[in-house]
Amino acid sequence: MNSHDDVNDVVITGYGLINPLGHSPEIFYQGLAENRSAVSWIDPLEGVDGQRWKGALIRDFDPKLHVQPRKTIKVMCREIQLAFAASMQACKMANLSAGIVEPDRLGTVFTGEIIMSDIEDMLETIQMCSKDAMMNLSLWGATAMDQIHPLWMLKSLPNMAACHVGIALDARGPNNTITTENTSGLVATMEAMNVIRRGKADVMIVGSSASRTCFSRLLQRYEEDYSHSDQDPSTACRPFDAGRAGAVPAESSASIVLERRSHAVARNATIVGTIDAFANVFCGAPKRWAGAQQATENAIQTILGRSDLTAKSIDHVNSAANGSIAFDSAQSHGIRNILGQVPVVSYQGAIGDSISGSGIIELIASLIGMQQGHIAPTVNHERTAEDCPIEVISGGPKPRTASHFLKLSNTPHGHCAAVLVRC
């Protein structure tokens, strides 16, 4: 895509978030700039199976303050409530509400993954089918089914976030949900861009919401990349650091408003960024994270080719580094091999890794930093590891020095998504 402004550019006109560091973009970014971490012990889970778990939780979230009409709260699980709240923030910033955009020209694309039921919703039913702390599955069909609330499944369907936001905004355009784990947020952004470029919509709401800290999720799957140390949880996740020992689970929600430039200009919307190029590549490998370096290199090369830019035009790379020994090293080598010493930042030391919820909120962090003229540092980074040959933004904010930033997201299986944003 050409770097000069064009009426068909896809621009960003709003963003919103609910995050462990804060329930607004301003509070969230202030926490990043002050080098604060939201990771703590997950109190209700202490002692479960002898394991103390840590994570970045969203605290003090009251859906009644964010979801209208309130009666819809009963058909939304926590993740969908969070997604709705972040989206309404983004729409408020973009001056969007029902009726502002022709309904058929307004669409939604969100991320999704398996939403684990809140344990409180099923606790009594499970107890009815248990004896001596052991589950008796023979009782489930005969006893439990009559006890399950009829709206139980409707509350937790992954595609319902896009549906609820679409209903609230009377958005009758394309409605989709992307499920590609860690890369979901950026892939959803690409999908929304393609919808606008194809002429099927003028405005797309892109959102993500995920929780890797809920009781059911942690019991079902505590990732092998997660930190198992007993150290202070606020310092547990250390991206690119010589002392890194793993990632930490998190929950988050974020949303951006994408719009055709000509449409945004016509309604006097404030443009906060332009997406100049994107890349979506896969380099499969039999071992976890083994394809990450090559996928990162291929994605960055594709971005440079599509944008006609060089490394000098990139202010920084917003990495998905999560403190994993294998991944941080692989991605840093991929960045270094193509971009040299372009500064790199990761925000997972502050907000943890919510997997499908991470990409968009991290993109927003860089977007705010570029607007303010300084990029918040990598929290918990003290000394760059020898196997991470990059310049890490750490200690304090870095002054903005170029026109673009690059956001990367990777899955353990070789998928890399990249988005190049001009501010």
Image (spheres, rainbow, N blue to C red):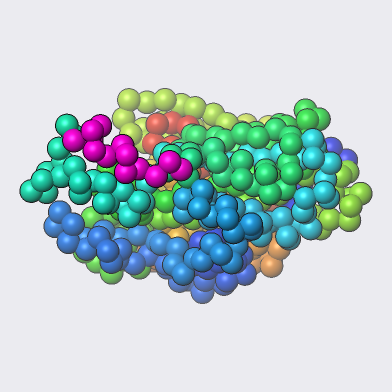
Residue drawn at 68 percent across, 37 percent down: 192
Residue drawn at 31 percent across, 30 percent down: 287
Relative horizontal placement of residue 267, taking residue 136 as reference (left or right): right
Which residue extends farthest bottom?
34
Residue drawn at 27 percent across, 43 percent down: 220
Which residue extends farthest left?
132
Instruction: Residue 92: give x, y in percent of width and height.
Output: 73, 60
Above or below, 90 against 207 in this view is below
> Could you say which is closer to the camera, residue 250 or residue 310?
250
Above or below, 285 against 331 in this view is above
> Could you say which is closer to the camera, residue 236 or residue 24?
24
Above or below, 287 against 207 in this view is above
Query: Dividing the picture into quarters, in which one does residue 28 lie?
Result: bottom right
Instruction: Residue 162: give x, y in percent of width and height.
Output: 60, 42
Query: Dividing the picture into quarters, in which one does residue 101 lie?
Result: top right
Characterize the magenta stretch by its predominant secondary structure: helix
Tell me, yes or no, if residue 369 can be seen here.
yes
Instruction: Residue 352: give x, y in percent of width and height.
Output: 41, 57
Instruction: Residue 307: give x, y in percent of width and height.
Output: 72, 37
Relative horizontal placement of residue 227, taking residue 351 as reference (left or right): left
The N terminus lies in quadrant: top right
What segment is highlighted magenta in the picture?
139-151
Residue drawn at 46 percent across, 26 percent down: 283
- In this figure, what is the number of numbered marks? 0
Which residue extends farthest right?
266
Q: Is residue 142 magenta?
A: yes
Relative horizontal placement of residue 285, taking residue 202 as reference (left or right): left
